[in-house]
């Protein structure tokens, strides 16, 4: 079912307002989820709305949090999100990091006591679109084993780095430290599709193509084996440890509906012009990207893509044609609409 981005934005915003999220915060969250769908990252888009609403209704996420800046100087800050929606705390923190970088070269803002914040690229691109370098990461519920281990020990702790690309637009890397995000497994489960081998294993550590076996006691695998494990551990230290907050198994699943998650994020912005003039930077980066795009190709490959380019094209296409939501997701969203008393989503084919 095709749904326009305007429809998605309005639907998400109205649903969140029904559970007493202020209009500005509802819009901030809706922008993040809609951007994910536009960019083809459906695992972090409107798929998450039902879970967000339920967590607010159960008091695990606060619709009106008392967000507090615990400490701050010219280059850094620590923010206690007070169980806010991750997008609300995340936007505030990234805006602070950008402001500090513009004034003092680098801005680093830590957030603790937060929740799922959508795609990390949403925040790193806030910086790159203003001519800065954005680096964003977060810890998550434990979903992966360490190399050589079994069971859920570390989160798949996403990392996004976005840099200005001159006339080519932003260059954006956004990845989880697992082979795929759990949201993709959930997406396949909703569509009753098998997952590729290597995405995850069952509760006994055996390879599986059944997404429900990964969801029900199984776990994701680190990307690149020990490399993904090492990066996930470093992110855990840069977020949960540095913020003096929860780590690993201490963080509860967002789907368990038992306790607040208390996730931590880190937001960094770097001012390019503190090192090189922006015009010179743009010229050099455009030369590099042109060189990459025109590299020799493997037989059968028509084009080499710059990180973030596929998502950008998807965003442009979906902005014109609409976002394709599964029948199961449409049913879930319209059941939620009925419960909340908001206008249901009406899609077309």
Image (tube, rainbow, N blue to C red):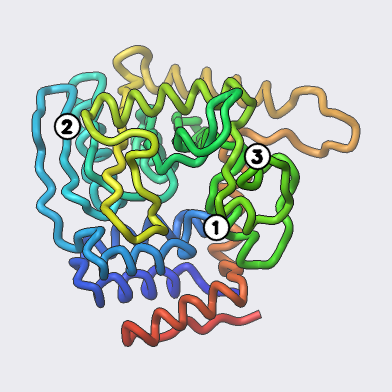
Identify residue for label 2.
78
Disc nearest the viewer among 2 and 3: 3
Q: Residue at x 32, y 70 (%)?
A: 13
Cα gap from disc 2 to disc 3, whole angstroms: 38 Å
Q: Earlier in the sequence, mark 2 or mark 3?
A: 2
Q: Tell me if 131 is positioned left or right of 95 in this view.
A: right
Q: Position of residue 316 (x, y in %)?
A: 57, 56
Look at the image and tell me in which quarter the C terminus lies.
Answer: bottom right
**Residue 111 disc label:** none
Q: Based on the displayed image, in which of its 4 quarters is residue 299 positioned?
A: top right
Nearest the camera: 204 or 36?
A: 204
**Residue 42 disc label:** 1
Answer whether residue 158 is visible to the viewer in this image: no
Q: Residue at x 40, y 45 (%)?
A: 122
Q: Earlier in the sequence, mark 1 or mark 3?
A: 1
Cα gap from disc 1 to disc 2, whole angstroms: 31 Å
Q: Tell me if 214 is positioned left or right of 338 in this view.
A: right
Please determine whether, in this image, residue 8 is positioned above or below residue 208. below
């Amino acid at each position: 079912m095709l749904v326009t981005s305007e429809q998605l934005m309005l639907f998400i915003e109205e649903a969140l307002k029904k559970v007493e999220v202020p209009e500005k915060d509802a819009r901030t969250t809706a922008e993040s989820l809609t951007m994910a769908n536009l960019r083809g990252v459906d695992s972090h888009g409107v798929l998450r709305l039902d879970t967000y609403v339920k967590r607010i209704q159960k008091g695990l996420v606060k619709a009106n949090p008392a967000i507090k800046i615990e400490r701050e100087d010219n280059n850094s800050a620590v923010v206690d999100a007070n169980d806010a929606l991750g997008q609300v705390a995340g936007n505030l923190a990234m805006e602070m990091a950008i402001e500090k970088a513009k004034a003092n070269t680098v801005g680093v803002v830590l957030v603790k006591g937060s929740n799922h914040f959508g795609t990390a690229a949403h925040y790193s691109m806030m910086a790159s679109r203003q001519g800065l370098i954005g680096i964003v990461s977060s810890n998550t519920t434990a979903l992966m084993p360490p190399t050589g281990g079994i069971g859920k020990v570390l989160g798949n702790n996403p990392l996004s780095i976005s840099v200005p690309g001159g006339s080519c637009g932003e260059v954006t890397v956004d990845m989880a430290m697992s082979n795929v995000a759990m949201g993709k497994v959930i997406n396949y489960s909703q569509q009753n599709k098998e997952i590729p081998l290597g995405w995850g294993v069952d509760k006994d550590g055996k390879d599986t193509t059944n997404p429900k076996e990964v969801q029900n006691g199984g776990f994701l695998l680190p990307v690149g084996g020990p490399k993904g494990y090492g990066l996930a551990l470093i992110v855990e230290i840069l977020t949960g440890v540095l913020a003096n907050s929860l780590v690993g198994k201490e963080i509860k699943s967002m789907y368990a509906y038992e306790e607040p998650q208390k996730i931590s994020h880190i937001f960094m912005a770097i001012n390019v012009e503190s090192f090189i003039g922006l015009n010179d930077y743009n010229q050099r980066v455009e030369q590099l990207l042109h060189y990459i795009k025109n590299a020799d190709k493997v037989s059968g490959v028509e084009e080499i893509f710059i990180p973030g380019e596929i998502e950008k094209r998807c965003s442009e296409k979906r902005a014109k044609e609409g976002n394709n939501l599964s029948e199961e997701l449409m049913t879930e969203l319209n059941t939620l609409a009925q419960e909340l008393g908001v206008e249901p989503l009406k899609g077309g084919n």
